[in-house]
């Protein structure tokens, strides 16, 4: 049996329509359309609402639950980005920038840069984090650390080497 919608929308249709016109993202528009359709009484079941707007029933259920618990302001606030806590400190970021933009730098690989940061600031930065930061922020193309295969046999390698 489909789940009925049993919430009351406190805001007026005009207020919701004006917010819909000002909405910047498609998600925000969808959330406001849900409230408008519920306010107009055009839908009775969550499944009808989901079908009409092109969202899943679970999404509609979560939106209605958020509206019922926290109100309109929390419903139309789109939270994206996850946990964006900075791993690299500001002084290390500045150091990386000077190292990558300095033409007299001796740094040729990310591993060297990682070692230099550790020696200078006594901070350990994960290789992947450093690589991603340098590529994203500075478009750098230093040497990438490549480990040889752990099962590699040195005797077999000697046989295949060209004289």
Image: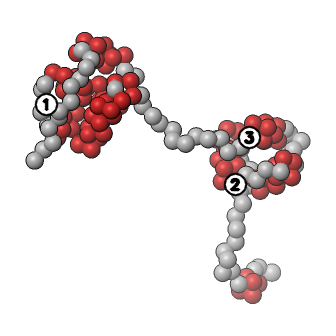
Q: Which residue does the numbered mark 3 point to in the structure image?
A: 89
User: What color scheme is it?
Assistant: secondary structure
Which label's residue is closer to the chain start, 3 or 2? 3
Which label's residue is closer to the chain start, 1 or 2? 1
Q: Is residue 26 visible?
A: no
Going by the image, does 17 lie left or right of 110? Answer: left
The image shows residue 4, relative to residue 130, as above or below, that is above
Which label's residue is closer to the chain start, 3 or 1? 1
Residue sitting farthest toward the front: 69
Q: Is residue 102 visible?
A: yes
User: Where residue 54 appears, x then y in whole percent?
Assistant: 23, 37
Foreground disc of the pair 3, 2 = 3
Residue sitting farthest toward the left: 1
C-alpha distance separating marks 3 and 1: 52 Å
Q: Nearer the viewer, residue 83 or 136?
A: 83
Q: Nearer the viewer, residue 137 or 86?
A: 86
C-alpha distance separating marks 3 and 2: 13 Å
Q: Name the residue rendered at 77%, 56% in the picture.
A: 111
Q: Which residue does the numbered mark 1 point to in the structure image?
A: 43
The image shows residue 51, relative to residue 126, as above or below, that is above
Going by the image, does 68 lie left or right of 121? Answer: left
Foreground disc of the pair 1, 2 = 1
Q: Name the residue rendered at 37%, 16% in the picture.
A: 22
Label 1: how many Cα within 10 Å (few below 14, some 14–19, many 20+): some
Query: For the residue labelled by badge 3, is the local secondary structure a helix, a strand or a loop?
Result: loop
Query: For the residue labelled by badge 1, is the local secondary structure a helix, a strand or a loop?
Result: loop
């Amino acid at each position: 049996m489909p789940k009925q919608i049993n919430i009351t929308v406190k805001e007026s249709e005009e207020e919701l329509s004006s917010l819909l016109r000002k909405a910047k993202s498609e998600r925000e528009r969808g959330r406001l359309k849900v409230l408008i359709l519920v306010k107009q009484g055009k839908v009775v079941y969550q499944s009808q609402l989901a079908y009409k707007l092109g969202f899943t029933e679970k999404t509609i259920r979560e939106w209605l639950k958020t509206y019922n618990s926290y109100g309109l302001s929390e419903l139309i606030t789109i939270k994206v980005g996850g946990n964006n806590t900075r791993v690299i400190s500001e002084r290390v970021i500045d150091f990386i920038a000077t190292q990558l933009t300095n033409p007299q730098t001796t740094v040729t690989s990310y591993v060297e840069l990682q070692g230099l940061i550790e020696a200078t600031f006594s901070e350990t930065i994960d290789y992947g984090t450093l690589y991603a930061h340098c590529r994203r922020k500075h478009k750098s193309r230093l040497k990438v650390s490549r480990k040889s295969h752990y099962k590699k046999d040195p005797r077999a390698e000697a046989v295949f080497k060209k004289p």
